Amino acid sequence: MRDRHPDTPIKGRVTERRVKLTASGRMINPRSLFHRYPGNPILSPSDWSYPANAVFNPGATEIKGETLLLVRVEDMRGFSHLTVARSSDGRGDWRVAPQPTLLPDEKIQEEPYGLEDPRIVYLSEEGRYAITYVSFSKGGPLISLAMTEEFQTFHRMGALLPPEDKDACLFPRRFGGRYALIHRPIIRGEAHIWMCFSPDLKHWGDHRVVIPRRPRWWDCHKVGLGTQPIETKDGWLIIYHGIRVAASGSLYRVGFALLDLDEPWKLMYRSEEWVLSPSAPYEQVGDVPGVVFPTGALVDKNSNELRIYYGAADTVVALATANLTDVLTLCKACPV
C-alpha cells in the first residue's frame, strides 16, 4: 500500500470507506461495527479462587457445546500462567478452574518467566487442539506450541522459533502439505506480521512479511496478530492490533485484514481505519491503560455473529461482537 502524509486527504474515497453500504442499503460505520457486551468485563481477578493480579488475553474455542477460554493469569510475582474458564453461552456464568491449567515447567529452558497470550485452533488432521503461546525465556519472549484433546493434559512441542517473537498462531489446515504459522518477530527493531511454513511443526522456513506496519498511520509502530485466523468464504480474516506511540504512551487499537484462502501469504484487503479502540473505563484504567488486545474469536454460524475476546488494560477480559458479513463488507472496501 502506498504511503502518504497523514494530512493528505483521500480524494474521492473518504465517504465510501468511512461508511459502506451493505447489499440491503444499511450503512456500516467502522466506529460502531463492534458492540461491547453490556456485562463487560466478563472476567476479572475477583473471579479466581486463588490470588491473581490480572486476567487477560485469552485464547478461545468451542468444546462440547461450550465456549472455552484459556486465560492468561498474572500472579503476584508478575509471572503468568494459563487457566481455563467455561461458559454455556460465551457471555456469562463463567466457571473458572480452581487451579492453574497450564503452569510454566521449571525443567523447560524457555519457560522460566511464564506463559502468555495463547491462541487456539483445532487441527482436524491431528484430532487435537493446537495452542501457540508466548514462553518468556531468559533470552526474551518466543513462540511455543502445545497440543491437547480435552484441555486437561498437554503435550508440549517446545519452542518453534527463537526470540524475540510474539503474537503467533497456526492456521487450522495445511497449504500444499505444509503447516503455516503467523507470528510477529522483531527484526532490526521493526515489528511486522510474518508468516512461515513447516512440514512437521519443528522445522520452519520460507519466511515472509504478510502485514507490515504503516508509517504515520494508526498502526505505525507495531502490528501483531490478534485472534486466531478465521476462515471465511472471502478469505482468512485476520484481526490484528496496531500500536501507535503517543506522548502519553502506546495506544493499542484493532483492525483487520483478509488473506487469500489458498495462498494465505497474499494480503488482499486491509482496513484503513481502526474498528475498536480503548474508550470504556475498563480499557482505560488498569495495569496498562489504553489497551484493547484481542486474542480469541468465535463465529456463531446460525446468527453470523462474530465474538472477539480481548484483554482490556492488561487487567480484565472483555467481549465485543459484530456481524461477520458487515466485517467482511467493510474490509473488502479496502483493497491493498
Image (spheres, grey):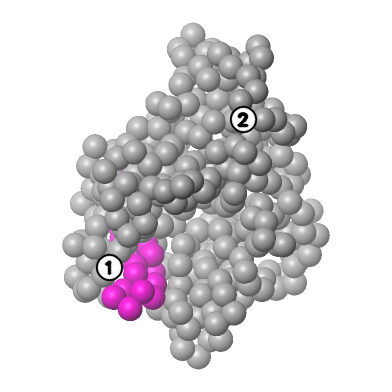
Q: Does residue 212 appear to the left or right of 62 in the view shown?
A: right
The residue labelled by disc 2 is 6
In percent of width and height, residue 237 lies at 58, 40
Location of the N terminus by quadrant is top right
**Which amino acid type is shown beneath numbered disc 1?**
Asn
Q: Give me the residue at 29% from left, 55% from top.
A: 286
Q: Quadrant of residue 328?
A: top right
Q: Does residue 189 appear to the left or right of 118 in the view shown?
A: right
Decide whether residue 236 is among the magenta residues: no
Decide whether residue 86 is among the magenta residues: yes
Residue at the far bottom: name it.
Answer: 107
Location of the C terminus by quadrant is top right
In percent of width and height, residue 243 lies at 53, 47
Q: Give me the residue at 67% from left, 61% from top.
A: 189
Please give the range of residues in magenta.
71-89
The residue labelled by disc 1 is 53
In percent of width and height, residue 212 lies at 68, 46
Residue at the far top: name it.
Answer: 25
- Rounded to the nearest angstrom, the CA distance separating label 1 from label 2 is 39 Å
Q: Does residue 324 appear to the left or right of 143 in the view shown?
A: left
Q: In this orientation, does residue 45 appear?
A: yes
In this view, the mark in front (1 or 2)? 2
**Which amino acid type is shown beneath numbered disc 2?**
Pro
In the image, residue 274 sits, relative to residue 167, either above or below, namely above
Q: Give me the residue at 34% from left, 38% from top.
A: 279
Residue placed most toward the observer, 87 or 225: 225
Q: Earlier in the sequence, mark 1 or mark 2?
A: 2
Q: Predominant secondary structure in magenta?
A: strand
